[in-house]
Image (cartoon, rainbow, N blue to C red):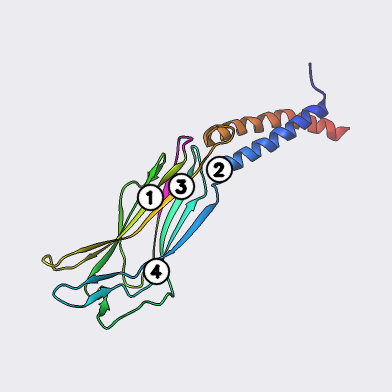
Amino acid sequence: MKLPPKVQLTIAILLLGVGIAGLLWAFLPPPQEKIVLPLQEIRVPLPDSDQNALLIQAYDIVINLPTALRMGGTSSLTFSLKKSDTPITISAMDVDMYDHYLVTVELKPEFSHANLTPPGVMKTSLLAGQELSMQWNLQTETREDTSGTFWVHFNFITDDETSPHYRTAVLARFVEIPTQTLIGLSTRWVAAVSSVFLVISLFLGLPNLSVSTEE
């Protein structure tokens, strides 16, 4: 039995709305959460000296991570070091870190139930007064929530091979990210079903729209 044109048009409008909503859910990333943590003052000893090398510039650690991961979708995770106006306590025994050491930052995010791109440890030099930012992509293919730890170390290296090098842990931040599905479907399935709804809405709606206009 063929449905009346107005009923077909109503169904087409409903399918169109559901299809658009599904595509938006599948392709728009979840909102981001911003975590700001002050970097602790860092001092390392100078070889054969009573003085300490001090990282004179104050920094904030800024982590932007998704409030949720959608199964089958991809979201970004960003780590930044931003200069801060927080005063640094400098004593008579402190000297500028960069006069004696090369400073590198080592980052290692470890997450369960999620794929991280690029994987492994990332290292970069931190020049005097410089800010830095590094980004990863997170993707999950399971319904399990994602959890893990964001590790950050500072390395202090000298040109003198006989002098000691120092490695300081500055952050071990545990995070949890829930995984979302839409009625149990991943983003790829939601996108596929939504596309089918849009096609059906066009086949139902366009002919009946012209009939409704003529009436």
* Residue 149: numbered disc: 1
Q: Earlier in the sequence, mark 3 or mark 2?
A: 2
Q: Earlier in the sequence, mark 1 or mark 2?
A: 2
Inter-mark Cα distance, 1 to 3: 9 Å
Q: Answer few, some or many: residues within 10 Å of disc 3's Cα (few below 14, many 20 plus, some between 14 and 19).
A: some
The residue that label 2 is drawn on is: 27
Q: Is residue 38 toward the left or the right of residue 99 in the image?
A: right
Comparing 192 with 98, the one in front is: 98
The residue that label 4 is drawn on is: 59
- Mark 4 falls on what kind of element? strand
Inter-mark Cα distance, 1 to 2: 27 Å
The amino acid sitting under disc 3 is Glu
Write the residue at 41% across / 61% down: 80
Query: Looking at the picture, does residue 85 appear above or below residue 71?
Result: below
The amino acid sitting under disc 2 is Phe
The residue that label 3 is drawn on is: 176
Comparing 168 with 163, the one in front is: 168
Write the residue at 31% across / 66% down: 126
Q: Is residue 26 toward the left or the right of residue 64 in the image?
A: right
The amino acid sitting under disc 4 is Tyr
Inter-mark Cα distance, 2 to 4: 34 Å
In this rendering, which labeled residue sits more in front, label 2 or label 4?
Answer: 4
Boundaries of the magenta span: 135-144
Query: Which image quarter holds the C terminus?
Result: top right
**Relative image position of residue 97 (x, y in whole percent):** 26, 73
Write the residue at 47% across / 40% down: 145
Q: Is residue 122 toward the left or the right of residue 47 in the image?
A: right
Q: Is residue 21 toward the left or the right of residue 75 in the image?
A: right
Query: Looking at the picture, does residue 51 appear above or below residue 108?
Result: below
